[in-house]
Amino acid sequence: MSGRTTVVLGMMLVAAFLLSLLVPWSAFGALFEQDRALAVSVLVELRLPRALLALTYGAMLGASGAAIQGLFANPLASPDLTGTTSGAALGAVITAYIFGFAAPIALSVGSVVGALLALLLLLGLAGARAETATLLLAGLAISALAGALTTLALALAPSPFAFYDAYDWLMGSLVDRSLAQAAFAALPAFLTIALLLRLRAPLDSLTLGEEVAQSLGHDVTRLRREIVCLTAFGVGSCVAICGAIGFIGLVAPIFGRRLTDGHPGRAILPAAAIGATLLLAADLLVRTAPLGRTLPIGVVTALLGAPFFLWLVAHTRWKLAR
């Protein structure tokens, strides 16, 4: 990736973050008027946590998606399509029935365990270098199972209030989160990204095959275990705070790989930047859309990402048929 591309990605990320803070402009304009205290409160207590969470969650999804695509050698792999996000959501919902949604540490542990079990089940069903059809079938089966169990958990909710709290949270949302929650999500997310960056060389060597990677001195079994644990840790921690947000982990790594000539390891950092920019833009769209109410951000990313996924499946099939 060239230096110019790095600068452009950085400028796009900074611009998206600033726009997320300042748009709509009413609070920004109030800084120069009489009601400055209210404006500062809106910016610091409402918009800053939301922007930080979008940056954190998007970057983690982009980096995790790049690592998972490199591990499976498949551009259709992502945290949501492999069942990781659904497993994390199921783990968090089960934990919430015991400790409530106001216990972030317990929710994080439950989410991480759910995501880890989903990834381990996927590795058992499809294998580490699964073909596209096998990967999709296994991922869809795990997502369907986790979704059905989550629906069952919602149906058995002890009260309507618990049901609606769980339902709103499952749709994915950055609303009404605090700076403390943003910091709680940022630590495991950026730790995950930093540790994944250490695996760039062995991930790139996997594109040549497992035997070649082994001959270059990389422990493929250990690499597989580290990627599974790290992505489960990152996805689970963010899902515990913001709920399930899909398709960012699919779209961002694909563009990241295009910028790095198909190298999954080198794509981790640009995919993180692209993922953060995409989620910031989606959140800005949610807040400014003239719909009379705020849509869950997970719904918006799904509406935007699903057509891209369908195009990607058709494009992959066309390439294989040639």
Image (cartoon, rainbow, N blue to C red):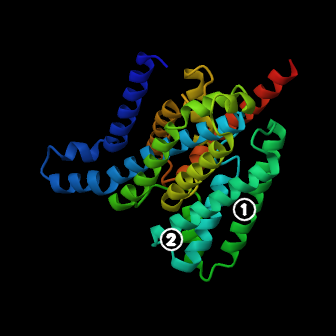
Lateral position of residue 31 relative to residue 174, left or right: left
Indicate which disc residue 194 carries. none
For image coordinates 54% across by 66% down, the residue present is 109
Look at label 1 and name its amino acid. Ala
- Tag 1 and tag 2, C-beta contact below 8 Å: no
User: Relative to 197, is 321 above or below?
Assistant: above
* Picture residue at 50% right of the left edge, 37% below the top: 197
Percent x, y for residue 149?
Answer: 73, 68
Q: Is residue 155 visible?
A: yes
Q: From this viewpoint, which residue is outermost toward the left?
A: 34
Q: Give the residue at x 79% y 29%.
A: 314
Callout 2 amino acid: Ala
Mark 2 surroundings within 10 Å by alpha-carbon count, few (fewer than 14), some (14 through 19), many (20 or more): some
Q: Is residue 265 above or below residue 294?
A: above
Measured from the top left, where is residue 173 in percent x and y?
Answer: 50, 56
Residue 40 rendering spot, x and y as whole percentages: 21, 52
Rounded to the nearest whole Å, what is the CA distance between mark 1 and mark 2? 19 Å
Quarter holding residue 7: top left
Can see residue 254? no
Asked if residue 29 is positioned above or below residue 4 in the image, the reply reads: below
Which mark, by number, is residue 146? 1
Q: Position of residue 190 (x, y in %)?
A: 43, 46
Q: Which residue is mark 2?
A: 106
Name the quarter where the C terminus is drawn. Answer: top right
